[in-house]
Image: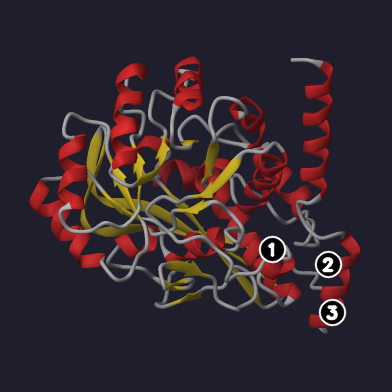
Amino acid sequence: MNSNRRNFIKTSALMAASMAIPSTSIMAKKKEKHITRIKSTVPMKLSWTPYDLQLKHVFTISGFSRKTTPVVLTQIEYDGLVGYGEASLPPYLGETQASVIEFLKKVDLSSFSDPTHLDEILHYVDRIAENNTAAKAAIDIALHDLVGKMIGAPWHQIWGLDKNKVPDTTFTIGIDTDEVVREKTREVLGDFNILKIKVGGEHDKRMIEAIRSVTDLPMAVDANQGWKDKHQALDMIHWLKEKGIVMIEQPMPKYDFDSIAWLTERSPLPIFADESLQRLRDIEKMKGVFSGINIKLMKCTGMREAWKMRNLAEALGIKVMIGCMTETSCAISAASQLSAGLDFADLDGALLIANDCFDGATLEDGKIIAKDLPGIGVLPTQDIKFGR
């Protein structure tokens, strides 16, 4: 890497870090405006509960199928306010409800007197143990929700974003039979402006043709590392472009950067990283390998780091997509705070489940729009029993 490129990346990183949140003075002014209560001397209280999401349909991607997704819901209480968070745990993340709860038991927030010291608190949380990114996200989201309520504003407003200027969200259709794929497509026609199709197997073309027999909506394709040969992948991408596909996500194994870079250079469609990307430290490695990145709160430890990742990627000329796991409206609403101005959004996670326990961001004309409520903009729709 030459010196000019190193300096550019260093400057971009510093710029992204400085853009991470409003300045201390801005936050202080907002708190002064919205908060009249005296600062509490009672420490923050973290509690949690396991919860199982029931999917409306069996969900199949390249490698496995499932009908449920385990999550752990969190809350942080402080000075009469409550912030809500969530850890979503699809099997491939490697975290479980038991591992998340074990991590949360190690978190002691009693030494922090001011929840608005986000960097300090989340740096402490991140250093408790390696990995555990979804568990860390559950704390990060709850803390952002709490701080937003203290300030009296939603995070999209705190970050200076227009919540209505968001990309259409994709609606995901998993690998299935022609009949089921057509049925799922018909169910959502009129609600979405773009679909996302899971591929990565021997029946990819059949899947696409089945959907094209029902609709001509634009489509994104997610191979979930399912393609192994770069030449075959390129042939497939050219065919997909003819079928109205607009982007490709994680076409090949996550560590095969040479093949992916070769593919990206020749592809007529943008290639986005998913499994190849985890956290802020990975952004520099994406430059020249992928056209864009898919940021997911569960992989990057939450909103704080996701915001920094967005800013650095944009400074480096990398396209940005905000994605999700199967999640309640809690985590989806948190992600929706970041989506304004991005290239793509995949925030349909709460729409895929039958037992959402939060009211939050809503689907409007094919877009996931955050509510104008302080914090992440959610309210529980049932009595959730949190404990330790």
Please, what secondary structure does the residue beneath circle 2 have? helix
Q: What residue is pinned by disc 1?
A: 44
Q: Residue at x 87, y 78 (%)?
A: 32
Mark 3 → mark 2, Cα distance in angstroms: 16 Å
3 vs 2, front mark: 2
Pick whichever of labels 1 and 3 is earlier in the sequence.
3
Q: Is residue 111 above or below residue 383?
A: above
In the rendered image, residue 31, in percent from the top left (x then y), is placed at: 82, 74
Q: Residues within 10 Å of mark 1 (few under 14, many from 20)?
A: many
Mark 3 belongs to which amino acid? Ile
Please, what secondary structure does the residue beneath circle 3 have? Answer: loop
Q: In this orientation, which residue lies closer to the viewer: 382 or 293?
A: 293
- Of callouts 3 and 2, which one flags the residue occurring earlier in the amino acid sequence? 2
Residue at 59% over, 67% down: 165
Q: Earlier in the sequence, mark 1 or mark 2?
A: 2
To which quarter of the image does residue 287 belong? top right
Q: Return the residue at label 3.
A: 38
Q: Which mark is residue 27?
A: 2
Asked if residue 129 lies left or right of residue 253, the reply is right
